Image (tube, helix red, strand yellow):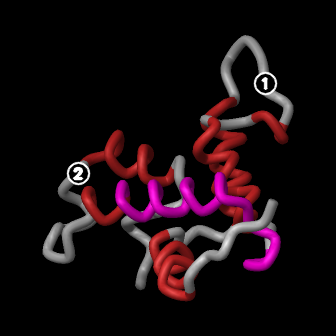
Amino acid sequence: MTAQVSTELWDTFHSVVNMTSRELQEWLSVQAAGQESEVVPDQAGAPLGRHVLEILGKRRTDLTEDDAQVMRRVCEIVESQRADHRDPQAGGADWRHGLMNIGHDPLKPA
């Protein structure tokens, strides 16, 4: 079932998710690779990051209510952790990598 996703949510999501689908896929694959094994690319990364990747591949008219909930959640996470005044370097590597897992690279130019 498709969901009505407002223009505001669509635009906000696509502004906070500043990594391309290719960049996010590559990042999730690198994060999932271990010394002992490597995860299948379609299964790489946390469920939230994989869902963001799926959303990036959809048209607005094809989004489900679950997609809309994930979009709202990602926007809230990024906005709460990225105050406008916060220096992108201030959070450290773990902070940056956590945001990159959901498609937001704080070091990427606006």
Front-most of residues 95 and 53: 53
At 68% from the left edge and 49% from the top edge, which residue is drawn? 51
Q: Give the range drawn in magenta.
A: 59-77
At 58% from the left edge and 68% from the top edge, which residue is drawn? 19
Front-most of residues 64 and 52: 64
In this rendering, position of residue 85 left or right of residue 27: left
Give the residue number, with chain letter if any, for mark 1: 38
Residue 64 falls inside the magenta stretch: yes
Q: In which quarter of the image is residue 63?
A: bottom right
At 48% from the left edge and 85% from the top edge, which residue is drawn? 8
Amino acid type shown at disc 2 = Gly
In this rendering, position of residue 87 left or right of residue 72: left
Q: What secondary structure prevails in the magenta region? A: helix
Give the residue number, with chain letter if any, for mark 2: 91
Amino acid type shown at disc 1 = Glu
Judge whether 103 appears above or below 87 on screen.
Answer: above
In this rendering, position of residue 101 left or right of residue 47: left
Residue 89: % across, % down: 24, 60
